[in-house]
Each structure stands twice: as C-alpha cells, then as structure tokens.
C-alpha cells in the first residue's frame, strides 16, 4: 500500500493537519475506555464527587473484587465462553462446506442460494425475534446453551460463508485438480489442500464469529433469562438497570468484558480487517 | 470432474440451518400477524390495532430521524478518517488500530460507558462543558426529551464510523497510482485530488457501505434499549424497540408480528437495493 509513494512524491495533507487529526481521532476513540478504566479503580466517594476527579488519589481494586467474587459475572463469563465457542465452531464447520461448494461447483440456482445467504446476513433481528421465541419455547430450548448457540448461528453463518467463499476462490484450482488426478477424494482435497492454504481466512472468520457472538445483546436478553445461561452483556445490563447503579462495579465489569475482545482483535487485526474488507467489497 | 450434485451436498447443511432459522420464522411471522393468540384467523385486525396505537407513528418518525442522523455523520466522519489514514505518517498503523476499537467493543459496553460519562451530576461530559463555561449548568442529556435522541445518534456514530473508515480506506488504497500521477501532472492540489480522484473512485464503496449502515441502523436496538429502553416519554422509541416491547413487555405477540411484517417489508426493500447495487458494482469493476 505504501510502496507506491516511494516512486512519486505525492501531495498530501499538511503535517500539522495530520497531527491534529490523529490526536483528535485517537482521543475520541480512546477517551471512553480511559474513563472506564479510571472509574473502575475509584472508590465510591471519588466516583460521586463534583467536579469529577481525573486521577484517583487512592486507586482501589474493590470494584474488581465485587465483580469477580460477589456477583454472577464469573458465571456469565463462563456461559459467554461456552456459547461463543460453541456457535463459532458450529458455524465454522457449516461455513467451510458451504463456501467450498459455492467456490468450486457450478449448480443450478447457485446465484439465488448465494443471495439467500446474503439476505440472511442483512435480515432485521426485530422481524424474526418473535417467531424464533415462540418456536424455541415450543422446542424447550429457551434458557439452554443450545438455544443461544443455534440462534447465534443465524447471525454469524451468512457472513462467514461469504468471507470464506471469496477466500477459497482465490486459491488456484490447479492444486486441487492435481490431487484429484492422483486419486484424492473431494473431502480429502478440501481438508488436506484447501484448508491448510486458507488458514488466514479461517482465522478471520473465527475472530469475526467469536467477537459477534460475545457482543450480542438482544437475543440473549430474550433467550437467556435464567442466570445459569445468561451471558456477559446481560450481566452488565443487570448491573446498570437496577435503580441504584453501582457505577464503579459497572465499569469494572465492562473492563472484564472488553479485555478479551480487545486482545483478540488487536492481535488478529490484520487478518480480520483483510477478511472483512474483501468479503464486503467483492460482493 | 465437477459433478453438479456434489455441490448441493456441500452447501446443503448450511442452507438447511439458515432455512430453519430464517425462512421458517419469516413465514411464521406472517401467520402470527393474521391470527389471534388462540390461533384463530382474524384478518387484518392486528394491523389495525397496532397502527392505531399512539406509539406507532412516534416510533416511525423517531426511526427516520435515528437512521438519517446516524448515517450522515457516520459517512462524513468515516470518509474523513479514511483520507487521514491514507496518508503516510509515522504511527499510522497504531492510529488505525485505535480507530477500530469503538467498532469492536460490545455495544452494551459502549452504552454503559457513555451513560456514565453523560450522567447529569457526576458525568465527565457535563463537567468538561461547564468548567470552561461552554454551557452554564449541567444538562440532563439522557432525561431531557430534546437532547436524548441526538445523544443516542452521537453514540451510534462513535461506534460505527470506524467501519466506514476501514472500508473506504481499503477502497482508497486500491486506486491505481496513474490516476494520482495524471492529476499531479495537471497541477492538482491535495484537496483537488480528494475531490476529483479519491471520492469518485471510492463512490461505489461509499454507496455500498451507506446502504449497509441503513440496514444496520434499522436493526440496531442495543444502544438505545440499554440506555433508555425507548424513553423518556417514547422520545427514543424506534420501531425495532417497539416490536420488542410489544412482544416481550406487553406480551402481544400477534400485534408485534403485524408490526414486524411492515417493518420487514421496508427493511427487505433496502436489502434488495443493496444487493442490486453491489452486484452492479462487481459487474462494473470486472
């Protein structure tokens, strides 16, 4: 991306504008998290003073103690991990096969089926949440891990299929043809040749699916009303919707919830962003 | 060697799951919308009831306001950020990573953190505005009917403009260098380059992203629901939240289904425009 500029001195934004722009941008993006972190280590008295205190004189971990040992948050954390991993894994398996089918085979109705997948991705949650609830209640899946895992596949599977299809398409078909001539089966080709070559694509899909399910709020609000299956977003909302909000604990819980996602995302960023932009712009 | 039936076998499991979890619920919504809670056919009764509700037109105009306000600022700020990040400067990689953070964090975390910052008495935002005298006294951002919607829009813009930025940036970086060279030979300034080279070249991306944002804004419940639940006095009630509350707070599944059907018709129209547009773009770029 930047090697083009070496050949030709390009006109650009004046340096002061770049500096000011970057500083404002970083401040706007990070300030809420900085404030979240600061608030999470303040004592109750320091949280509720006017004017607000910029730096706590006695940083405390009491709020984290409350969140980790005196609330349901650890249990919800575990639920979130189980549900996110479960649905990510299932969506991944289905997406691998479907994307391979879309990328490597021509069959009748393929464009229509692909459009159907895309529509699935864009469908308004609000339009299907009522019938899904009625159906899951009949099946006895409300307040179970399986219920949420299944539901979360709807929101991650379509884009996963879309991203992986464009990834598989970019792998030269000749490699597979050679293996088939050597007597490999279709599945053998998929698992021994295509998948090892697609590791970056697979990782970006994993990150996408995990982050999306970890963050999901509305379905969880309806399908997990029992504390044995509630996820972290619901736990966080519980803290703050009670009449007397304990803001220190809320901010500590927010930190606990954000850290895994921030670490996962920042370490996988290049792959993830590459996959997203490819999936969304190639169509 | 490409037997056709094998292709179906590969895509079948995923399509079955999507069919069961998407196509079936949609059909079921249709059925719910024309029956009562005993399952008897009642024609358009549910539609009449929900359209007569006082909240419905309020929610409709709130939704328009919410979608339009969000989109305009998300696109403008996103494109400006992309142009900035397309420059070469030290630390660009870090700035780009940081820019993406609002977009990846959970919506509920964004909602609670902003709610705390906007707290009337102890919030940092009121302090930052009152201390230098920009406003005279603290504003009840989340309780005042005239500020609550703009504040919700601002939070949504903060959350989503990074997505626009990253998409437009990808578009900017795929612009062939000859176009810049040609512009420079003609003596174009930087802003002329932005206007005559960059923006026209990324127009398809901007259009596609804008449509996506419309769809997402129509879907977005988390921020508003977590902060205000549609209040105060329905000032932030948007249609998806009305559906949600009709179904799960008033337990009127059939009226909620009727509202869902109308909402779905609008949303699906935007979805089809999006698909047509992106298909046309893909065709044009090949």
Image (cartoon, coloured by chain):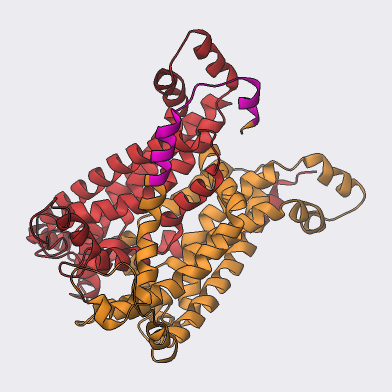
Chain colours: A orange, B red
How far from the left and from the top, in percent, is residue A209? 54, 62
Q: Quadrant of residue B191?
A: top left
- Relative to B215, does residue B14 appear above or below in the rendering? below
- Which percent across, then down, holds residue B285? 55, 26
Q: Is residue B34 left or right of residue A233?
A: left
B69 within the magenta span: no
Q: Residue furthest right?
A: A182
Query: Residue A51: x percent and y percent?
Result: 19, 68
Would you say residue A189 is visible in this rendering?
Answer: yes
Task: Name the residue: 91% across, 52% down.
Answer: A183
Is residue B41 among what the camera can see? no
- Magenta stretch bounds: A3-23
Q: Nearer the viewer, residue A113 or A207?
A: A207
The quarter of the picture where residue A229 lies is bottom left
Residue A167 vs residue A24: left or right?
A: right
Q: Is residue A7 magenta?
A: yes
Q: Which residue lies most toward the front here?
A: A57
Q: In this rendering, is residue A156 above or below A169?
A: below
Q: Is residue A220 above or below residue B221?
A: below
* Magenta highlight: main SS: helix
Judge left or right: residue B97 versus residue B46: right
Which of the pair B183/A48 is nearer the observer? A48
Residue at point 35% right, 63% down?
B110
Q: Residue at x 93, y 49 (%)?
A: A182
Whether residue A49 sits left or right of residue B270 in the image: it is: left
Q: Quadrant of the N terminus of chain A?
A: top right
Q: In the orientation shown, which residue stands out farthest toward the top?
A: B186
């Amino acid at each position: 991306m930047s090697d083009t500029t070496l050949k030709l001195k390009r006109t650009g934004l004046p340096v002061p504008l770049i500096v000011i722009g970057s500083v404002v941008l970083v401040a706007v993006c990070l300030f809420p998290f900085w404030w979240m972190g600061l608030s999470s280590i303040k004592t109750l008295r320091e949280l509720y003073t006017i004017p607000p205190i910029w730096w706590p004189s006695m940083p405390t971990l009491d709020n984290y103690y409350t969140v980790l040992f005196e609330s349901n948050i650890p249990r919800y954390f575990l639920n979130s991990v189980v549900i996110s991993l479960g649905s990510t894994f299932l969506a991944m398996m289905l997406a691998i096969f479907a994307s391979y089918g879309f990328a490597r085979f021509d069959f009748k109705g393929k464009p229509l089926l692909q459009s159907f997948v895309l529509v699935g991705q864009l469908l308004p949650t609000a339009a299907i949440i009522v019938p899904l609830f009625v159906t899951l209640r009949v099946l006895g899946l409300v307040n179970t891990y399986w219920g949420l895992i299944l539901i979360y596949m709807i929101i991650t599977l379509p884009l996963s299929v879309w991203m992986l299809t464009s990834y598989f398409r970019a792998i030269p078909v000749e490699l597979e043809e050679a293996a088939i001539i050597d007597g490999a089966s279709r599945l053998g080709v998929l698992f021994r040749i295509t998948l090892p070559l697609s590791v970056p694509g697979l990782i970006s899909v994993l990150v996408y699916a995990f982050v999306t399910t970890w963050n999901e709020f509305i379905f969880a609000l309806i399908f997990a009303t029992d504390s044995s299956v509630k996820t972290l977003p619901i736990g966080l909302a519980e803290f703050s919707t009670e009449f007397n909000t304990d803001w220190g604990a809320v901010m500590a819980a927010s930190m606990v919830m954000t850290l895994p996602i921030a670490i996962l995302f920042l370490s996988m960023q290049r792959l993830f962003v590459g996959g997203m932009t490819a999936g969304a712009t190639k169509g | 060697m490409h037997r056709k039936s094998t292709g179906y076998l590969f895509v079948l499991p995923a399509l079955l799951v999507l069919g069961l979890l998407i196509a079936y619920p949609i059909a079921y919504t249709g059925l719910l919308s024309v029956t009562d809670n005993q399952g008897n056919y009642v024609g358009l009764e549910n539609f009449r009831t929900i359209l007569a509700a006082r909240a419905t037109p309020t929610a409709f105009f709130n939704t328009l306001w919410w979608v339009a306000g969000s989109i305009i600022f998300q696109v403008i700020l996103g494109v400006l950020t992309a142009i900035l990040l397309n420059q070469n400067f030290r630390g660009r990689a870090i700035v780009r990573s940081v820019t993406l953070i609002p977009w990846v964090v959970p919506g509920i975390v964004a909602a609670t953190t902003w709610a705390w910052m906007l707290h009337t008495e102890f919030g940092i935002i009121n302090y930052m505005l009152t201390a230098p005298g920009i406003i005279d006294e603290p504003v009840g951002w989340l309780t005042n009917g005239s500020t609550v919607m703009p504040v919700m829009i601002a939070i949504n813009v903060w959350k989503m403009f990074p997505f626009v930025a990253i998409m437009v940036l990808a578009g900017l970086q795929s612009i062939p260098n000859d176009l810049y060279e040609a512009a420079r030979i003609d003596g174009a300034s930087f802003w002329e380059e932005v206007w005559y080279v960059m923006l026209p070249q990324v127009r398809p991306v901007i259009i596609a992203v804008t449509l996506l944002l419309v769809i997402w804004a129509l879907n977005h419940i988390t921020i508003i629901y977590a902060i205000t639940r549609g209040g105060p006095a329905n000032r932030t009630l948007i249609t998806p939240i009305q559906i949600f509350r009709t179904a799960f707070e008033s337990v009127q599944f059939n009226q909620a289904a009727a509202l869902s059907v109308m909402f779905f018709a609008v949303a699906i129209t935007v979805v089809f425009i999006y698909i047509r547009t992106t298909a046309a773009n893909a065709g044009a770029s090949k």
